Amino acid sequence: MLRLMRMRYESYVADAPCRLDVFLTERSEFSRSHVKTLIEEGAVTVQGEPCKKAGFSLKSGQTVTLAVPDLAITEALPEDIPLDIVYQDDSLAVINKQQGLTVHPANNCYSGTLVNALLFSLNQFSGINGTLRPGIVHRLDKNTSGLLVVAKNDIAHRSLAEQIALKTCRRTYVALVYGVVKEDSGVIITNIGRSLKDRKKMAVVADGKQAITEFTVLERVNGYSLVRFDLKTGRTHQIRVHCKHIHHPIVGDTVYGPEKDPFHLEGQLLHAFRLAFNHPVTGEWKTFSAPLPPYFISVMKKLGFTKKEEEL
């Protein structure tokens, strides 16, 4: 991985009187202790003037700018990481991504991603997203498993991206959620954007982008529900945020659900199990599926679920 050092600037406007360190902790992605360190090191200005006092009293309307070092990643390198390639031809590849694998380099994740694995296993990609996200048309969260499609050339990339935008590409997920979902089926429509309380999280917010998720309950057992979700939009963390919004967070999701996971999982029980689209070249309707991971099935069996995969 090739990297360059640069500075990243984030500006926020105070909407009410507040301590400087408290204000930045609420608005930025950093902890209060790290914010205090940044302030003391001179990385913060208020109204354009340096401020090194964590307890400085901000006034409403004042602009605070935070400068932090940022590693600019310039190129991803091939890495021999096992991949489950469900299908591939000269135009595209369909991958069954394992839980725990980040899709592409970003932030503090510079290697060990799906992109690094793809560069090792495949020999061509579309160039639309540059050298850091070659062929990546859509993403899955790090701890979400399942299917995604990779474009091998620009024609395929444009076609697949258009199908996602026009909602003709079908992306179907299965999740195990806490609680008994009363409705047999329905549609969740909200606006999703960055959380004002924690910048690392997404949330239902008034000024966010519209997010639409259709759901169908497959089975209810012992205070849990197995639910199928069909994405109509593709917002960051959409299904996870929507599950939290309807008060049925996904089992294993300690970010949007309970901090204590009774099953000691390594991530949420959310799996992209079906993907369907028109082939960019032939126009043929292609449908792919990926079985639920063993750890997902294990929890279902412990709870007494009987739904078979062919019934999903």
Image (spheres, rainbow, N blue to C red):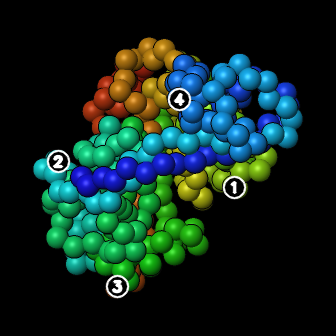
In space, the residues marked 4 and 3 are separated at their CA atoms by 55 Å
- Residue carrying label 2: 81
Mark 2 neighbour class, 10 Å CA radius: few under 14, some 14 to 19, many 20 or more? some
Q: Are marks 3 and 1 in contact (CB under 8 Å)?
A: no
Give the quarter of the image for residue 286: bottom left
Judge from the rendering whether residue 252 lies leftward or rightward of residue 98; answer left or right: right
Mark 4 neighbour class, 10 Å CA radius: few under 14, some 14 to 19, many 20 or more? few
Position of 16 relative to 109 (above/below):
above
| Sequence-first tag of 4 and 1 | 4
- Residue carrying label 1: 209
- Residue carrying label 4: 41
Which mark's residue is nearer the viewer, 3 or 1? 1
| Sequence-first tag of 4 and 3 | 4
In space, the residues marked 3 and 1 are separated at their CA atoms by 32 Å
Q: Amino acid at mark 1?
A: Lys
Q: Amino acid at mark 2?
A: Ile
- In the image, 130 versus 283, the foreground residue is 130
In space, the residues marked 4 and 1 are separated at their CA atoms by 36 Å
Give the quarter of the image for residue 86: bottom left
Give the quarter of the image for residue 240: top right
Q: Is residue 204 visible?
A: no
Q: Amino acid at mark 3?
A: Val
Q: Are marks 4 and 1 in contact (CB under 8 Å)?
A: no
| Sequence-first tag of 3 and 1 | 1
Disc 2 is placed on an element classified as loop
Disc 1 is placed on an element classified as strand
Q: Are marks 2 and 1 in contact (CB under 8 Å)?
A: no
Return the mark for residue 182.
none
In space, the residues marked 2 and 4 are separated at their CA atoms by 39 Å
